[in-house]
Structure formats: C-alpha cells, structure tokens
Amino acid sequence: MNVNEYFDGKVKSIGFETSGQRSSVGVMTPGEYRFDTAAPEKMTVVAGEMVVKLPGNIEWQTFSAGDSFDVPGTSAFDIKVSDSVAYLCDYL
Amino acid sequence: MNVNEYFDGKVKSIGFETSGQRSSVGVMTPGEYRFDTAAPEKMTVVAGEMVVKLPGNIEWQTFSAGDSFDVPGTSAFDIKVSDSVAYLCDYL
C-alpha cells in the first residue's frame, strides 16, 4: 500500500492489491488534469462527479458516483473536477 | 484533503469534502482493527471485503464491494481484513 501525490498534491491516491487485482483509490480536488495511462484502466467514481474527455473523443462526458469507464493503455485522458471527487482505478 | 495513517500505517485514508459531505476513502491491509466513532458513519466497501462486528452485535458479518453499513456515533466497531480492502466512509 503506497500513497502517491500528483499535480502538486491536488490529486492523491493509495495503491493496493486485493485478490490479485492491482488498484488505487484516490481523491481529486478541483482542477483540470491530463492523465497518461500505461496499462489499460477501469475508472469508477466513488463519490462526487467528474467530467471526462476520453482518448479520441471530442466530447466531454459527466460521470457520477457508481459510474465507470474504461481507458485504453498507452493513452491520455482529460478530467475536469469542480468539487472534490473520489475514485477507484483498476489496472487491467 | 488530508492523508491519515492508523494502526502503524496498516490503514491509510484520504479525507475530503464534496457537496458539503465530509468523507474519506481508504485502504486497510490485512489485520484486525477496532475503530472508535465520534460522529455516526456510513461505511461502504469499494473493493475487496471486510468482516465486521457492529456495536452491540455478537455476530460477525461479511461486507463486499458495493455493500454498506451504518455505525452509530460515540461507539466502536471491529473489522477483520484477510486481503486488502478499500472503503468509503461518510460522516453523517
């Protein structure tokens, strides 16, 4: 279990592994972020909401608590956060 | 947003507030823990599972991803974790 900070500490996450699945839970405070992926990821919103532009998309989509979306590996996606949002990220 | 550690770093959490709701997301590594509550809490399992003995109960109950349970304020509850588990805690 390791704590990571990104974007000057505006995004923090805790990495863990359960049943052999590598994942992290984290919190993003308000801001606009571009994340690069190595492995493909499944993101699930745990609390709050985020606005996301997925790779190859021109439209922004809103995801709320309980919603999830997949991101291809070796890509990048954009997230806008207007109020803090908690997420689960599964590395696929 | 603040990172907290409990039980010699075996439990870590990130506190945040969204839409006026104070919450935290965290990870518990394998172990047995007794948590004291100040405010009442709603706990939701985000990934993995935990075995819980709620205040006043003699039986242990298993909660898996998606399950939640309420804990009264000014009480204590016990959690057993055999593989890492991620949780959301809402302070009610």
Image (cartoon, coloured by chain):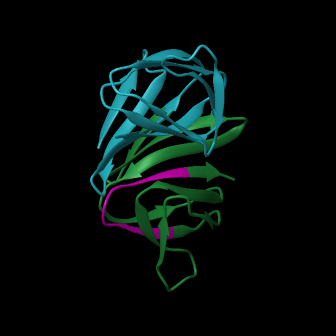
Chain colours: A green, B cyan
**Does the segment drawn in magenta span residue A4?**
no
Relative to A59, residue B50 above or below: above
Which residue sits furthest right? A20
Residue A77, given in percent of the width and then of the height, sits at 50, 69
Relative to B40, residue A54 above or below: below
In the foreground, B75 or A12: B75
In the foreground, A28 or B41: B41
Q: Splitting the image into 4 quarters, where does residue B48 fall?
A: top right
Q: Residue at x 47, y 62 (%)?
A: A35
Residue A60, given in percent of the width and then of the height, sits at 46, 80
Q: Residue at x 33, y 56 (%)?
A: A84
Q: Main secondary structure of the magenta part?
A: strand
Q: Splitting the image into 4 quarters, where does residue A40 fall?
A: bottom right
Which residue sits furthest front? B56
Total marks shown come to 0
Residue A6, given in percent of the width and then of the height, sits at 37, 50
Which residue sits furthest bottom? A58
Looking at the image, residue A54 sits to the left or right of residue A30; the answer is right
Residue A34, given in percent of the width and then of the height, sits at 43, 66
Q: Splitting the image into 4 quarters, where does residue A79 fall?
A: bottom left
Give, as a single range, the part of the protein colored magenta.
A77-88
**Does the segment drawn in magenta span residue A85?**
yes
Looking at the image, residue B89 sits to the left or right of residue B80; the answer is left
Looking at the image, residue A61 sits to the left or right of residue B62; the answer is left
Q: Residue at x 36, y 32 (%)?
A: B40
Q: Residue at x 54, y 74 (%)?
A: A54
